[in-house]
Amino acid sequence: MAVPTNGNGHYDWAKEVKEFDETKAGVKGLVDAGVTKLPRLFVHPRDKLESHPQIKSTDGVKIELPTIDFEGVKDGGARRREVVEEIRIAGQEWGFFRIVNHGIPLHTMDAMLDAVRRFHEQPTEEKMPLYSADSRKKVRFNSNNGPLRENESASWRDILTCVFQDDHLDPEDIPLACRREVQEYVKCMIELRETMAELLSEALGLNSDYLSRMECMKSEALACLYYPTCPEPEKTLGTPKHSDTTFLTLLMQDNIGGLQILHDDKWADVPPVHGALIANIGDLMQIISNDKFTSVEHRVVAQAVGPRISVACFLMPSQRAAGKPFGPIKELVSDENPRIYREFMFREYYEYYKTKGQHVNSALPHFWISKE
Ligand code: OGA
Ligand code: NI
């Protein structure tokens, strides 16, 4: 693709965005068209690509994400207390952990990954009607999950988003290529969400039903991600550095790898483990926990191998909960642990995130209590 220019011969970012959007074919469309050079729109500034050193396996440093085994957790007793303690530590120190024996059948997970691939690999014409950056649409297909900010680089991936508001989405609205699998997978996510809500409540020292009664995780935005092979992976990113805007995210990745988390200010790989899920604390959970849990920045590198498929289940508040103010849970605030964040409405939070852009640092300071 020729580099779009304006009348003065300068690179015209807006024109390239418009041309790319008009194809409605996503990044996969570029790959199908046989691009061998990364289009300028997808080139990320070097300082963003190299924001932190990367831990390589050759460094001899092995960073091992905590793995939490949910076997026997529903039986209560000593095992449950152990798991709660493991979650407390992982949520505080890592913000990310793996879950095994979570109860979701392997065939449900594999069928979901296959279905996501099927959706993205069907003829472009089938996907085009869903192409949209309008975040009010419950089901939408695009590459950047909303409009790019002025001069922002695009990412090397396509997304199908399905939003289950208050656990509900009309099945007719889900693309046929993955309808059955998405419904089944969300059912499993809701079940695991209930368990997670109990365990996280207990890890915060609250009653088991505390977070569930808050309804802070009662909606799911399912991001069905497709990272095509990339001709110049070192110049771009699959997903740029960010922290999740959620309460909690439950992530499934296929066997390709590419996810990295920022640990001790270095990028650490999170290698895939078949059958495991990854849970990560989102910004809203960090806020209501008054920093007892940490929302950690992460990214996905672009690769010459692929496509890579992952499914992120973003747990967000119910409509009712979104209508009430959020802030640190009062039981977690004391003279020794003074409140760090002010109260705000979910709408304010959401609007702030939408205008903030992907390439700036954490949004949390915006909600800090002003220091007197
Ligand atoms: C995200 C995300 C990771 C992945 O979509 O927020 O971090 O592995 N995805 O795709
Ligand atoms: Ni994320």
Image (cartoon, rainbow, N blue to C red):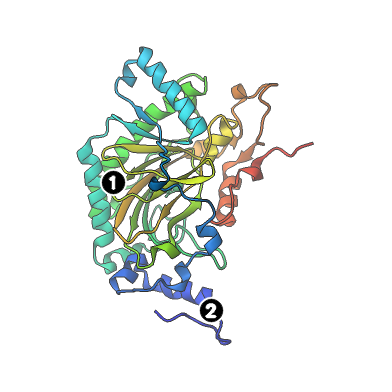
Q: Are marks 2 and 1 in contact (CB under 8 Å)?
A: no
Q: Give the labeled residue for mark 1.
A: 182
Task: Indicate the position of residue 358 as horizontal and vertical percent values.
Answer: 53, 56
Asked whether residue 362 is in view, the answer is: yes
The number of callouts visible is 2
Identify which amino acid the numbered label 2 is placed on.
Tyr
Name, please, the residue furthest toward the top.
Answer: 77
State left or right for residue 222 relative to residue 292: left
Instruction: Give the CA distance from mark 2 to mark 1.
Output: 41 Å
Q: Give the labeled residue for mark 2.
A: 11
Task: Indicate the position of residue 264 as horizontal and vertical percent values.
Answer: 53, 40
Q: Quadrant of the N terminus?
A: bottom left
Q: Is residue 32 above or below residue 56?
A: below
Report helix, strand or loop for mark 1.
helix
Report helix, strand or loop for mark 2.
loop
Structural crowding at the residue carrying mark 2, measured as other residues with C-alpha within 10 Å and reported as few (<14), some (14–19) or many (≥20)? some
Residue 304, image quadrant: bottom left
Name, please, the residue furthest toward the left.
Answer: 107
Structural crowding at the residue carrying mark 1, measured as other residues with C-alpha within 10 Å and reported as few (<14), some (14–19) or many (≥20)? many
Q: Sequence-wise, which precedes: disc 2 or disc 1?
A: 2
State left or right for residue 138 relative to residue 147: left
For the point 35% across and 35% down, the residue is 190
Q: Is residue 41 above or below residue 346?
A: below
Task: Indicate the position of residue 320 as horizontal and vertical percent values.
Answer: 51, 36
Q: Mark 1 near ligand 1 (CB under 8 Å)? A: no
Q: Quadrant of the C terminus?
A: top right
Task: Indicate the position of residue 247 as horizontal and vertical percent values.
Answer: 49, 38
For the point 38% across and 46% down, the residue is 57
Identify which amino acid the numbered label 1 is placed on.
Val
Closer to the eye: label 2 or 1? 2
